[in-house]
């Protein structure tokens, strides 16, 4: 998962974007103005920046230019604005922004823009060392079934189990129990399966199960589902 810097002078926007992107498994840094954004950038290089254009001290386009001229624009930047125009968006892309989101930002547009930005900037896999067999050339060893591990020039093949496979889609339940207990056991397994399948993303599980996210949170806590474990899994 990625480290994302959200720069916006509106507390509500920062809180909303932080909640959504944290649910997606990302680590979020927040800044309410250009000064705080500069401090974060000096301390680290985020994988992505969501940058508001209109801010009270220094606007987002000016900060974008500053990063570009100082050699600090080494990460993708998505500009955001509720009052932007086409000209503003075009200007921002000229100075290094890769996308523009118009407020109010919908959940689907946000997640799509973030996913596309991170995919575009993801490092390409390194070429295998000499002597290491290529899976592309050996279809009898599919990637989902094995993983190669190099140690002192010797490679061994070990099974690689996807997180989703850790919870079977079909499970047996004890039916010789009160209805309420049997139903709770089923619902707990049901939600744990979908959480594992969606890598701990509460947003996707809510969409998948047809529940409002607030209702989903209450339901999971009531059933005793370990949410901290799913959050850790989503950051692996």
Image (cartoon, rainbow, N blue to C red):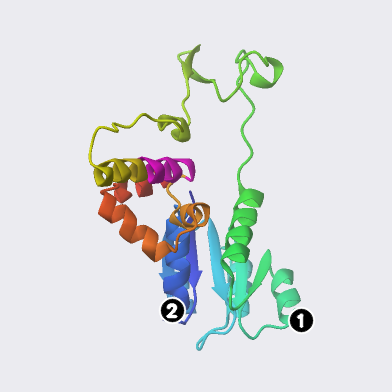
Asked whether the viewer can see residue 235, the reply is: no
Disc 1, SS: helix
Residue drawn at (45%, 52%) of the image:
201
How many marks the image carries: the answer is 2
Disc 2, SS: helix
Q: Nearer the viewer, residue 30 or 44?
A: 30
Q: Nearer the viewer, residue 43 or 106?
A: 106
Q: Label 2, label 1: how many angstroms apart (C-alpha)?
A: 27 Å
Residue 37 percent location from the top left of the image: 47, 72
Say whether residue 67 is magenta: no
Residue drawn at (46%, 35%) of the image:
164
Residue position for label 2: 12
For the magenta stretch, what is the residue range?
A: 189-198
- Tell me where residue 214 sits by quadrant: bottom left
Say whether residue 196 is magenta: yes
Asked whether the viewer can see residue 135, the reply is: yes
Residue drawn at (40%, 43%) of the image:
190
Residue 85 percent location from the top left of the image: 72, 83
Residue 117 left/right relative to 159: right
The numbered mark, 2 or 1, whose residue comes first in the sequence reads 2
Residue 127 percent location from the top left of the image: 64, 27
Residue position for label 1: 87
User: Looking at the image, is 136 positioned above or below residue 209?
Assistant: above
Q: Residues within 10 Å of mark 1 (few under 14, many from 20)?
A: few
Q: Quadrant of the C terminus?
A: top left
Residue 129 percent location from the top left of the image: 60, 20
User: Looking at the image, is 180 positioned above or below residue 150?
Assistant: below
Q: Residues within 10 Å of mark 2 (few under 14, many from 20)?
A: few
- Tell me where residue 51 sits by quadrant: bottom right
Magenta residues, dominant SS class: helix
Q: Nearer the viewer, mark 2 or mark 1?
A: 2
Mark 2 in CB contact with mark 1 (< 8 angstroms): no
């Amino acid at each position: 998962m990625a480290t994302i810097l959200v720069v916006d002078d509106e507390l509500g926007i920062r809180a909303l974007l932080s909640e959504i992107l944290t649910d997606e498994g990302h680590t979020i840094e927040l800044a309410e103005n250009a000064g705080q954004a500069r401090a974060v950038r000096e301390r680290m290089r985020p994988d992505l920046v969501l940058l508001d254009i209109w801010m009270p001290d220094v606007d987002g386009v000016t900060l974008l230019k500053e990063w570009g001229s100082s050699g600090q624009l080494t990460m993708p930047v998505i500009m955001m604005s509720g009052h932007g125009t086409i000209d503003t968006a075009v200007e921002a892309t000229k100075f290094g922004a890769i996308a523009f989101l118009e407020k109010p930002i919908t959940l689907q547009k946000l997640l799509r823009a973030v996913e596309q930005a991170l995919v575009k900037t993801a490092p390409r896999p390194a070429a295998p060392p000499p002597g290491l067999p290529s899976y592309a050339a050996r279809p009898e060893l599919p990637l989902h079934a094995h993983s190669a591990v190099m140690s002192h020039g010797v490679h061994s093949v070990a099974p690689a189990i996807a997180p989703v496979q850790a919870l079977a889609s079909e499970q047996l339940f004890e039916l010789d129990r009160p209805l309420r207990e049997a139903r709770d056991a089923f619902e707990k397994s049901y939600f744990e399966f979908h959480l594992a399948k969606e890598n701990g993303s509460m947003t996707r599980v809510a969409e998948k199960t047809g529940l409002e996210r607030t209702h989903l949170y209450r339901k999971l806590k009531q059933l005793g589902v370990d949410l901290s474990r799913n959050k850790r899994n989503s950051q692996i």
